[in-house]
Image (cartoon, rainbow, N blue to C red):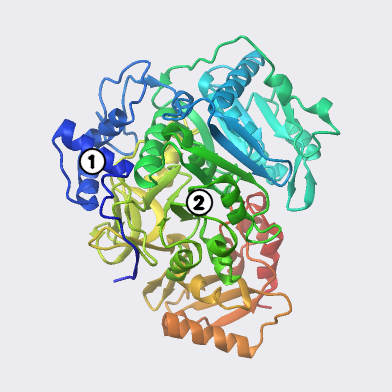
Amino acid sequence: MAKVLWEPPSDVRENTRIGAFLRRLEAERGLAFDDYQALWQWSVDEPAEFWRAIWDHFEVVAHVAPTDTLPDATMPGARWFPGARLNYAEHVLRMPGVADDEPIVIARSQTRGPVELTAAELREQVRRARAGLRRLGVGEGDRVAAYAPNIPETFVLLLAAASLGAVFSSCAPEFGTRSVVDRWRQIEPKVLVAVDGYRYGDKPIDRTAEVEAIRAALPSVEHVVRIGYLNRDADAARDDWSGLTAATDEPLEFAGVPFEHPLYVLYSSGTTGLPKPIVHGHGGILLEHLKMLALHHDLGPGDRFFWFTTTGWMMWNYLVSGPAVGAAVVLVDGNPAHPDLGWLWRVAQETGTTYFGTSAPFLLSCRKAGLVPKDFADLSRLRGVGSTGAPLPPEGFEWVYDAVSKDLLLASVSGGTDVCTAFVGGAPLLPVRAGEIACRALGARVEAFAADGTPVVGELGELVITAPMPSMPVGFWGDADGSRYAEAYFGTYPGVWRHGDWITIDERGACVITGRSDATLNRGGVRLGTSEFYSVVEGLDEVVDSVVVHLEDPEGGAGELLLFVVLADGVTLDDTLRARIARELRTALSPRHVPDEVFQVGAVPRTLSGKKLEVPVKRILTGTPVDQAAAKGALVNPESLQYFVTARR
């Protein structure tokens, strides 16, 4: 059993939001649960009762009450809370337990000075922006697009659009023209809100040409609203945001929309074709985020919730639901490694952050650099750390408890853009064990399937979800008959959501995810996940990044395991380093993990949200032309694909 790094205090049920939920279940419904696993089992065995309890516990405001909770649980097509009419923005701006003069948005940027909004100021900004959108003719169902970073204006725009029943979509300004147009051409936005540029570290990046190109490529756009973010002093005349949010007497009102009414459109990475436009609904996102933020992350009034993210990653949408549970949000825009890897930890101190969310690669980079944040930043307010984006290996867990704090709840979480949440993660009722995801989230019937579609426990299997969740997509934009949506998630196992990861779930419900199932390394019939492989290889001082692929032998032989490494400045791949890599893999993992060949490359291909891409590499190595192996606009570094064309020559 993995090493225990943190245990819940004896009074956990008295002092956490999940404890309050348990007390209410017992008092009002006569339901008592001895432990988390029993609570989880009830939540997935009785989904209608569980989600109605969530609705009641968080006092969801309905303009029209639902007639039922889950009359049809068939996937795809499950129906949640039919007849209900509500509004996501109304619940975010309710900000329970927060006084009007308390900060609710705390923003830090490498482009401009600090910005803070109190609860009253946030409501006022949304009221004005809502009126401004109405002046531009925006109404229910219209699309509003934001080419803007993680700043208060983007958050205000989301809430203003949602209050009208309009549909929001964002792309981070580091996205190139092609990437943006591939996404927004599908949804035909009426209004485009865009920054003029931004600063990444100490480097100014002008985006005015990209904004003009995006507008030219989107004939549906009737209005462009510019935010003077990079050149706000010199170019004040071109800052249309102040006009959009000009003084008005128009009241702040909220359109009561159906539970499944589109709230926003998120996108798949689009590495093998057009990005899938994933539509999320008001009700499903609201209930899922209330549950996760309060019950799993234990966030509420007095908390300051930070997750390092861009507006091109679903974690931004997850982050900005914080005020719905009374938590202030910390919005950070910039280069997380500038001027050094300690910047975000210093921002956490400065902003009084109580929950610090980031990616596993960032935590591992801090560890590799020898950082000890508790030595240079006062993190005494920190109660929780969240890690996602990739599996966090045991040494990453141990670094957090050694170098950050021994008194916090570390949650390694995994989910996806597809559900805009985590379906496996942590919970205050459970201990933290090195390298393990503590649990399956409440209401998420996550299972591991063997190749024949039967559930397995304690064995590696396909990650599937065998019962509906409210935040599963409403559908794909423009997919009138639902066929694309059905094929994407339900084509392998009819009526069962296949997510595309390998997972092992033990008898306690703890999980280990070992990588994407489409990037599996199959050696002699044994499936090897990529995450543990990267943990070992990138633990070497000489290795900055890596990607590994397995090429099958069409005649049934062992095939080839090929490793590509990006090395530190001044380091060259030689036989000594190759032997050391092989020795480390053999010792830490097994002889099966030793690659047949190791190559040095200049970069590893990554998506715009930073995830490494094994499948396009595999395609190139098996003869697929580069322009067909991946959509270059979906990569942050498309030039990296060229390394693999010549790597074996």
> Which amino acid type corresponds to the residue marked 2 in the rendered image?
Gly
Looking at the rendering, in which quadrant would you find the C terminus?
Answer: bottom right
Return the residue found at the far right.
234
- Furthest-left residue in this view: 30
* Residue at 61 percent of width and 78 percent of height: 541
Foreground residue among 389 and 647: 389
Residue 558 in the image, given as x and y percentages of width and height: 44, 80
The foreground one among 367 and 538 is 367
Amino acid type, mark 1: Leu
**Mark number for residue 106?**
none
Check disc 2 and report the residue beneath it: 357
Q: Residue 6, how many percent across, how many down?
A: 35, 62
Instruction: In the rendered view, tell whether residue 365 sits above or below residue 359.
Output: below
Q: Residue at x 32, y 41 (%)?
A: 17
Label tally: 2
Q: Which residue is mark 1?
A: 22
Q: Is residue 63 above or below residue 2?
A: above
